[in-house]
Amino acid sequence: MAETLYIVIPCYNEEEMLPITAKELMKKMDALMDEGRISRNSKVMFVDDGSKDATWEIIEKLHNMQASDIFTGVKLSRNKGHQNALLAGLMTAKKYADIVISMDADLQDDINAVDGMLDKRAEGCEIVYGVRSSRETDTAFKRSTARGYYKMLELMGVEITYDHADYRLMSRRALEALSQFKEVNLFLRGMVPMVGFKSDIVTYERNERVAGESKYPLKKMLAFAIEGITSLSVKPIRFITALGVIIFVISIIMLIYFLITKAAGDTVRGWASTITSVWALGGLQMLAIGVIGEYIGKIYLETKARPNFIIDIDLEEQSSEHN
Ligand code: UDP
Ligand code: MG
């Protein structure tokens, strides 16, 4: 039996793009169904993220279309942002689907990569990441900042797939596991690798947006970038602690140096003690902030209530299923 595929697409003010996207996806879904690669119950699920234009009306129209019943939709009560809309779609789709693929409404991600994802799925993967093979369509600015950003995330100890956005296939099992992550600060591309399971990547060329404009202006992009670091890493706190230690050590060295120069009799009265205490106190305070931060970091991770483990294979369960 072919599996049921749901394609989840978050949409915010996408009235210009939706008709084009729907047409392309209908062709793709029909082809996949005809080839028997996905079941006839497969659907495209649009998530309206509180759009202010005719996005929802278009989704309803697509859903009520006579010629095809592959379109369905979910409407959020208000705009909650790309990541929340995406999660809403994934969690809704997992009720009906065996596998879910998420992509953007603007078709910047090549929909033909879906074939490759299904191939990997057939090989037993629970998660397949879509990875851009080139960034030629992006501006030089976006390209270089993105590169630097991924490097920085890596330094912060965040496990992330290079040049992977939110174009990915997840099985229902992987989604069930993801649903155990209770955090409200979402950076899905950093959270999904924590789920684990057998996974692989599929590369594709990224296209330009055909209609409408980017819903990610620089300000939102920066906020998203900071979210990525602060929701996945407590390293910035460690950095402060380390800085505090370094400054304190410098003050000790200064003290020793001043004592030596004093012994040599070559000093200005009062200066050495003032400067040394400024550095020593500064360093100690920073160290103290870092230590407090360390505990706040722990509280932060606790409040996220992430699962401590996710079981891939339980032989006991497998054998009882067969009985
Ligand atoms: N999006 C959303 N809610 C928002 C902003 C964006 O659901 O508040 C959707 C948008 O409709 C699109 C996807 O997120 O399907 C990615 O947005 P966009 O293509 O504008 O981002 P870019 O490709 O420029 O990074
Ligand atoms: Mg886009």
Image (cartoon, rainbow, N blue to C red):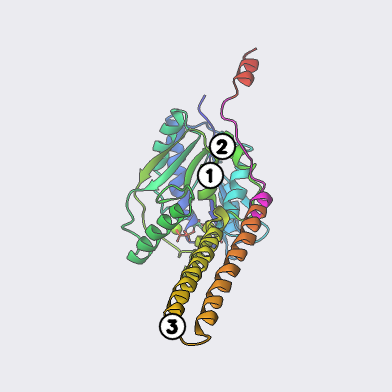
Measured from the top left, where is residue 273 in percent x and y?
Answer: 54, 80
Q: Is residue 42 magenta?
A: no
Q: Is residue 309 magenta?
A: yes
User: Quick check: 152 above or below 44?
Assistant: below
Question: Which residue appears at 36% of the width and 44% of the height?
Answer: 203
Which residue is more in the foreground, 54 or 240? 240
- Which of the two marks, 2 or 3, is nearer to us in this view? 3
Is disc 2's CB within 8 Å of ligand 1?
Answer: no
Task: Kindly tell me whether residue 15 is visible in this rendering.
Answer: no
User: Quick check: 311 above or below 148?
Assistant: above
Q: Which class describes the residues within 10 Å of circle 3: few (<14), some (14-19), or many (20+)? A: few
Is disc 1's CB within 8 Å of ligand 1?
Answer: no
Q: Which class describes the residues within 10 Å of circle 2: few (<14), some (14-19), or many (20+)? A: many
Q: Mark 2: which amino acid?
A: Ala
Q: Secondary structure at mark 2?
A: helix
Which residue is more in the foreground, 155 or 50? 155
Measured from the top left, where is residue 69 in percent x and y?
Answer: 56, 41
Question: Which residue appears at 42% of the width and 55% of the height?
Answer: 150
Label count reads 3
User: In which quadrant will I find the C terminus?
Assistant: top right
Disc 3 to disc 1, C-alpha distance: 64 Å
Residue under pointer 3? 265
Magenta segment: 300-313
Residue under pointer 1? 192
Answer whether labels 2 and 1 touch (C-beta < 8 Å). Answer: yes
Q: Secondary structure at mark 3?
A: loop
Residue under pointer 2? 174
Q: Mark 1: which amino acid?
A: Val
Which residue is more in the foreground, 160 or 206? 160
Measured from the top left, where is residue 277 in percent x and y?
Answer: 56, 76
- Which of the two marks, 3 or 1, is nearer to us in this view? 3
